[in-house]
Amino acid sequence: MKNLKSFPLAILIVVLTLLGISSGYTLPEGRQALITQFGRIIGTPITNAGLHFKLPFVQDVRLFDKRILEWDGDSNQVPTKDKKFIWVDTTARWRIIDAVKFAQTVRTEDAAKTRLDSILDGATRDVISKHNLVEAVRNTNTLLDQAKERKDIVADKASDHSLTEKIEMEEEITGELESIVVGREKLSGMIHERAKNNLVELGIELIDVQLRRIAYEKSVEDKVYERMISERNRIAEKIRSIGKGEQAKIRGKLSKDLKEIESTAYRQSQEIKGKAEAASIAIYAASLSQDPSFYEFSRTLDAYKKTLKNKGNVVLSTDSEFLKLLHKR
């Protein structure tokens, strides 16, 4: 009897537990929920994380992400306006801003990515095909602007042959660069503008689109690289030529400076020698003026040393003036 009395209580507990489990649900962070009743959406999306309740058994919960999601497109071959076939990789960030529209149109995130593939790839193809390749590769005309600024600075200053050659070489290098009007960043913005209106209808906000990679078609890639290598080699050779010219100028200036230094040193040494000889003569003359007879005696002795130092015969008259000192006693 006791077990029979406790049986309804157990059934009641089980029923209440099932009702609690069926009516309560937890919404995690970064997610949003829609309540559906027999497949029809009831109310507005629930976005606050935590414990929530619904009618048990008759209502269901569908969860959707409310965080920023990534989309990576497949590489597509696209012809540019200047008839160059390139491979374009795009990437984008998006999020669900209207869960009701999203559930009614695309239903799941996988289906949404399929729609993103179609819309973004189409927008990318339309935008790229209406612009030249250079617009998708470069973002600014910085190199061209800097070259023009340096050229203007040189034009305002005194003429410098070597600097002029460098500027001419830089003009030749930058002359290969085509000026852009739109640029890569603006192209990304144009793709974003073209695609986002179509995605709003799906309850999706397109945050941004970026051109991740651009590559030539394989059939023309090798030829492009060969041309680039040839151009770089030609420019490198011109740079070497300018360097050799500068080397010759430096060596010529060095040789000229060396000759000037040697000439100046020789002139200064000759001036010093001349002054020294003049001083010597002046001293010598001063000493002679003090005792001319002693000078005569000294010079005669020097003559004897030079004449009579070697063994030999010298024939002189006994009254020769040369031997006058030997006659004196």
Image (cartoon, rainbow, N blue to C red):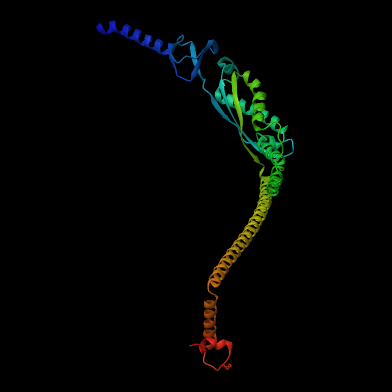
Q: Is residue 286 visible?
A: yes
Image label count: 0
Question: Foreground residue, 135 or 77?
Answer: 135
Considering depth in this image, is 288 or 230 the residue closer to the camera?
Answer: 288
Tell which residue pokes out farthest to the left in this image: 2
- Depth check: 261 or 64 in front? 261
Residue 121 visible from this viewpoint = no
Q: Is residue 59 above or below residue 314?
A: above
Please tell me which residue lies in front, 249 or 180.
249
> Residue 186: percent from the left, percent from the top?
66, 29
The image shows residue 303 at horizontal and vertical percentages of 55, 83
The residue sitting at 54% across, 87% down in the picture is 324
In the image, taking residue 60 as reference, residue 278 lies left or right, namely right
Quadrant containing the N terminus is: top left
Asked if residue 130 lies left or right of residue 287, the reply is right
In the image, residue 297 above or below residue 212: below
Which residue is situated farthest in the front direction here?
329
Residue at left 68%, top 40%? Answer: 150
329 relative position to 114: left or right: left
Task: Report which quarter residue 210 is drawn in.
Answer: top right
User: Against 143, is 324 above or below?
Assistant: below
* Quarter-of-image position of residue 206: top right
Image position, residue 51 (x, y; %): 42, 13
Q: Position of residue 288 (x, y in %)?
A: 55, 72
